[in-house]
Image (tube, rainbow, N blue to C red):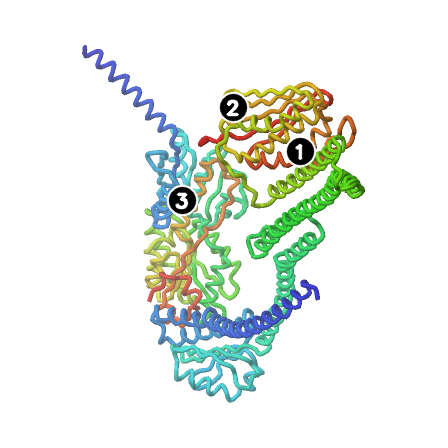
Amino acid sequence: MRLRTKILLSVIPTVGTALLLTGWLVINSATRSSHDAVYQYCEGVLDAYFTQDLASRVELLKKNQLENVASFVDRFQQEALTAAGQLHLVWPGHLFIVDDRKNIIYCSSDEMSDRLPEAWDSILERLAEAPDRVLKGRIPDGIYGDFVAKYFRPWNWGVVIVIKGDFLHEREQRIWITVASVGVITSIALILSLGMLLHKFIVEPVISLRGASQKIAMEEAPVSIPVKDGDEFGELSRDIEGMSYRIHQSRKALREAYDDLKSVDEMKTVLLSNVSHELRTPLTSIMGFAKLWLKKIDGRDPDTPLSAKQMAALRDALSVISGQGSTMNDMIDNIVVLMALTADDAAAEMRSHDLVTLVEKVSNDLWEQIEAKGLSFALTAPSESMPVKVDGKLIELVLKHYISNAVEFTQEGEIEVRVVTNEDEVMVEVRDTGVGLSPEDAEKVFEQFHQAGDVMTEKPKGLGLGLAICRKIVRLHGGQVGVQSRLGKGSVFYFSLPCIDDV
Amino acid sequence: MSVARFSKLYLCLAAILLLLASNVYAQSLRVVMVETMPVPVVTDHENFFLSGLEKLGYHAGKNLVVDKIEAQGSEALAKEKLRKYLAGHEVDVVVSFATLASRAAKEVLEGTDIPLVFCVVSDPVGAGLIEEVGLPTKTNVTGLVFSLMRKSKMELAKELLTQPFPDRPVRVGVVLSSYPAAVNDLKAMRGLGGQIEFESFSLEYRAMPDGLDAMLADARKGVTTLSPEIDYWWIVPGPLGETMEFSDLLLQSGVPVGLCHTKECTRNGGLFFVTPNYEDSGFQVAGMVDSIFKGTAPGDIPPVPPDSFELGINLKTAIELQIVIPSEIMELAGKNVWR
């Protein structure tokens, strides 16, 4: 069942019951008030059209000392009775005047005077007992309805005004019709108004909230609910809006995490592929030489010493095995370092070091390679020492990668290491006159597993982790890495380290 | 400074004051009252008229000049004095009191545009002042008719006077002078009579107050003549009916006076009187004069009966005559009920 139907099913009986009760109370009250009003009206008529008139006549007689002049009294009484005869023009009931001997001296209805019920006696007796009171009541036989009676003492007249039963009945009917009409119209108006109000204040917000929840389920964007009231619905809509925003954020974070994981997975695949490939190459050399020499050793006399030529060849083979083993070791070192830096708790051991000394140490370690390629090397620094607070081993690793890359990709010319500084940071630049990088490679050269093409062989070397490790190390120190390069013209790889005051 | 210079200064000041005074005087409105004779009904009306003007903002000596011409009961004298007055003054309104003065004023003002407002005239049509009561006259004459509608007066008389004689017509006696208002009233009343039959004795009108004794002497003859034939006396309007001497004459005749013309007559033993309310009438005439001052042409103001009347009853007389006064009439009489 729809909410609207439920509300209507709740409102209609409630309003109906309330109106029935109210109507019953109103009719009761109105009937009572009507009777009271009729009594008051009778009393008013009795007073205004008759009692006051009698009183004024008596007053006039008294004022002129005529109360004992019979001719005047008779005349005035006659005038009063004539005036009473006009009462039917304004009054729908009957008037009786009875003297102190219970003789009817005036009756507005001949029919009634013939059928005077016994009840009159009691009314007249009660009037005589309480001459100053206005008597009100219902005539017992119920034919003529209610009455109001008063005793007019100066002339000993009992004056009784009777309200016709059908007059009262008509009034009651009018009250019933009025109350019923008003009740029906009011209930329709109330039900419609309440329905509209409830629809506006309950159904509409609920529909909006439902729409919003559907939107949250279907769409990713945060929802805006057009319920801005300060009531519970307003609060609920704001909560739902907040919830949808948080869901949106969570979804976004999940998607990013998913993308990261996917990227890591892809990297892992690339890593495994690279590692397997790069490890297999030196292993092939190692295993080849090892097998060759095993075969040679197995096929010869153990007592016959190796000739000088054979010794030289053995030495070359062992040298290759050692070199390839060293390459494999470097690869594994790089992987270990990268793993260590990728870990959540990766941290640098920050200590004071002289950057110039670090550069010199690394260049000395690589001096053999530099010389082997016939390259010149220069170190430029603003002073002989440049104290920095870094993890010495890690920065050495960065310098090693930068300089060894420069040596590797430079066929002739020179390699220059520059150390420059300003107030905020220290910058180390490694310039070479090597093959340079294409703009595409320059953009991606610091990413993991990216290998720039060898211009000579077009075959990438290594795992593509060196510069990625450099970037992680420098970022771990709070610095930045970068490269400026032109294909065929050489490159400048640089990194910056923030100056730390307490060095 | 020489005496001659002082004299010139004083003269200049006096001239300025005179100029100012004459200017104020010129701005004042002028009313002349022409009085037939100083009987109470006339003098009362004069006083209430002046009070009415005061209430309407006209103050004698400030913005109003009021002069009075006394005709001493003589129409000829009224004409003569008014002509003389008009020759020397510019008059804004002439107000005449009672029939003779009103007739004289109308004649004198004939052909002029000076407005004439009459009052205390019972029968202005009969007196030739207007053609019809209640309609604009389109002349320079308007005024207040000193009478209630005769039909009402007659109905009241029938209600009271016929009570002791339910089986026959009532005979009333009227002693009247030849004063026009009296003659015309009797004539009109006879036309409405029905159950009331009028027996009359006429005498010659003489200018009041000098002619009163002569008229009373004639009236005595009338009383003697009519008394055996009538049930009540009936006093008609006119100077004679206004006098206490005449009403006393009738009251002492042994025949009850049914209709009086004055309050005093009723208080002294007459059955009832009904006349216009003097105070209201005086104010009503002042209202007419005010309208004329404000630019309304007198011919556009219809002559009307007064707005209110005064009724008086003597209960002692009523009880003696076995007449029961209905409560409505007694209430209308208000304070004017005597016993």
Q: Measured along the vertical axis of the image, is residue B63 above or below residue B264?
A: above
- The amino acid sitting under disc 3 is Phe
Residue carrying label 3: B97
Quadrant placement of the N terminus of chain A: bottom right
Q: Measured along the vertical axis of the image, is residue A324 above or below residue B183?
A: above
N-terminal of the pair, mark 2 or mark 1, is 2
Mark 2 nearby-residue class (10 Å; few <14, some 14–19, many ≥20): few
Does residue A434 appear in this view? Answer: yes
Do marks 1 and 3 share a chain? no
- The amino acid sitting under disc 2 is Asn
**Position of residue B337 in the picture relative to residue A30 (left or right):** left
Query: Which residue shows up at 45% across the image and 84% down it?
Result: A124
Query: Which residue shows up at 56% across the image and 37% down it?
Result: A476
Residue carrying label 2: A422
Chain letter, disc 1 residue: A
Residue sticking out furthest to the bottom? A118
Residues at marks 2 and 1 touching, judged by CB atoms closer than 8 Å = no
Chain letter, disc 3 residue: B
Quadrant assignment, res B322: bottom left
Do marks 3 and 2 share a chain? no
Position in image of residue B94 (x %, y %): 42, 38
Judged by depth in the image, the label closer to the viewer, 1 or 3, is 1
Mark 3 vs mark 2, CA separation in Å: 131 Å
Judged by depth in the image, the label closer to the viewer, 3 or 2, is 2
Query: Which residue shows up at 37% across the image and 75% down it?
Result: A69
Residue carrying label 1: A446
Q: Measured along the vertical axis of the image, is residue A154 above or below residue B40?
A: below
Q: Nearer the viewer, residue A496 or A78?
A: A496
Q: Nearer the viewer, residue A170 or B51?
A: A170
